[in-house]
Each structure stands twice: as C-alpha cells, then as structure tokens.
C-alpha cells in the first residue's frame, strides 16, 4: 500500500478559484491524471491562529488509512499523531484550496476510498501554555545539563504544538468528509495504462 500511495503527489494551489467548493475527483483534461480537489474553509474565530491542515484517506472497509504529509506523500496511518499536510505558523487564512494528483490516468486502485479534510489551530490559551512550558524548561536546562539529565528533544516545542493541533482537530471535530473516489479513466485510449 505504501508504494501505491507514495506515488501520489500533492499540489497546493493557493490561487483563488483554482478548486471547486467541495470535494471533487475529476480529469483536468483528456489524457491527464485524475485530481482530487477541495477547499477547506476555516471557522472565522480560527483565522489568523497558528494551524495545520490534515488530509486523510481510508479504504471502504476502513482497514487501511493514510495521511498526506507536508512532502506531499501519503503516510500509512498506524497510530499516534496524524501527519500534517500543510502548516500555517503565521496563522491560517480564511480558506485554502487543496489538490492531490493520482499516480496514473485511472482511479481504479482507489475506487470507493473516502477522503477527509480538516484542520487544527493553537488558540491563545494553548499558546500561553506552550510559552510557560518553554520558560520552565529554559530555567531548568542549565542544572539538568550539568547533571547529564537534559534531552535535546526538550529544545524544541514542535511535538507539543503537533499534539495541540491534533487535539483541536479531533476534540472539536474540525474535519469533514470530502468525497468517495469514483472510477475515472482520463485516457480512454490507453484504458488507464
């Protein structure tokens, strides 16, 4: 599955009007590759907060799932924090168009797979918690380094931020179903080969 899914590439198109106002899998033209596209709209109160977009896909029987990562590759989901598709450190916009191109001219291997899209943000109280945590760690670092009890992992707040984003996505249900992948053959002359 990883080999099949890793062949998908992501195209993030930020131009207005570049995607449709809902999940869609379509051929851009004859003899092209099918493309999933959707526009994610953020809640008004979340606009401007640091955040991340998540794109997930699972089989019809929910036995296999994957998340799109920032490199545009599908990562099989085996548990833990979801990989992020797009990060907005300076704050999420009002909306963001997303698109993923399938690896061949047909969607045949993915028919029925369900695509979901969502996001999480770091609100003001979470930002305050992360700041206070950083201050406490910075204050404790010299003594712990001297004692040989400091982990370099504590120099970075990324894991805490990812956990907060994941919690906001799941706890506040900031995700939605986008589309079930239909059968499309964008090159009828070759039969999808």
Image (tube, rainbow, N blue to C red):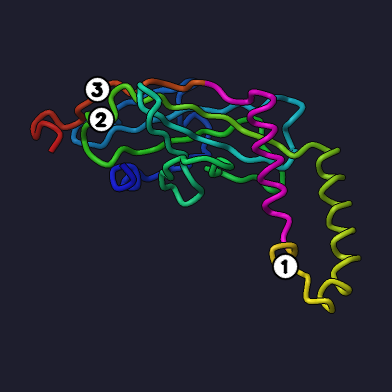
Is 100 a magenta residue? no
Say which residue appears at 46% left-offset and 22% top-offset. Answer: 178
Report x, y in % for residue 123: 79, 36
**Is disc 1 placed on a helix, strand or loop?**
loop
Name the disc covering residue 151, or none.
1
Question: Between 161 and 100, which is closer to the camera in this rendering?
Answer: 161
Q: Which mark is residue 183?
A: 3
- Vertically, is 63 above or below 85? above
Q: Residues within 10 Å of mark 1 (few under 14, many from 20)?
A: few
Q: Quadrant of the N terminus?
A: top left
- Give the Cα distance between marks 2 and 1: 46 Å
Going from N to C along the chain, the mark reached first, 2 or 1, is 2
Nearest to the observer: residue 1 or residue 78? 78
Q: Secondary structure at mark 3?
A: loop
Mark 3 in CB contact with mark 2 (< 8 angstroms): yes
Percent x, y for residue 22?
48, 20
Whole-percent x, y for residue 6 in the image: 35, 47
Residue with the most extreme bottom position:
146
In terms of secondary structure, what is the magenta stretch mainly?
Answer: helix
Which range of residues does the magenta coloring cover?
Answer: 156-176
- Point out the image quarter for the C terminus: top left
Image quarter of residue 144: bottom right
Q: In front here: 32 or 158?
A: 158
Of the two numbered discs 2 and 1 in the rendering, the one whose residue sits closer to the viewer: 1
Which residue is at 25% across, 30% downward? 107
Whichever of labels 3 and 1 marks the residue nearer the N terminus, that label is: 1
Q: Where residue 180 sits: x, y (%)?
A: 37, 20
| Residue at which label 2 appears | 107
Say whether residue 163 is magenta: yes
The earlier-in-sequence mark between 3 and 2 is 2
Residue 46 located left or right of residue 139: left
């Amino acid at each position: 599955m990883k080999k099949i899914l890793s062949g998908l590439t992501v195209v993030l198109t930020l131009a207005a009007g570049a995607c449709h106002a809902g999940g869609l899998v379509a051929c851009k033209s004859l003899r092209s590759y099918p493309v999933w596209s959707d526009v994610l709209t953020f809640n008004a109160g979340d606009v401007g907060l640091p955040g991340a977009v998540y794109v997930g896909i699972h089989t019809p029987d929910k036995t296999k799932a994957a998340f799109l990562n920032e490199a545009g590759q599908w990562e099989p989901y085996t548990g833990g924090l979801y990989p992020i598709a797009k990060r907005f450190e300076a704050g999420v916009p009002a909306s963001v168009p997303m698109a993923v191109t399938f690896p061949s001219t047909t969607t045949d291997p993915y028919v029925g797979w369900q695509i979901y899209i969502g996001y999480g943000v770091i609100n003001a109280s979470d930002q305050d918690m992360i700041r206070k945590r950083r201050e406490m760690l910075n204050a404790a670092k010299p003594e712990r380094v001297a004692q040989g009890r400091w982990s370099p992992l504590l120099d970075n707040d990324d894991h805490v931020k990812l956990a907060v984003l994941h919690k906001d996505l799941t706890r506040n249900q900031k995700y939605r179903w986008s589309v079930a992948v239909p059968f499309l053959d964008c090159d009828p002359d070759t039969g999808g080969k």
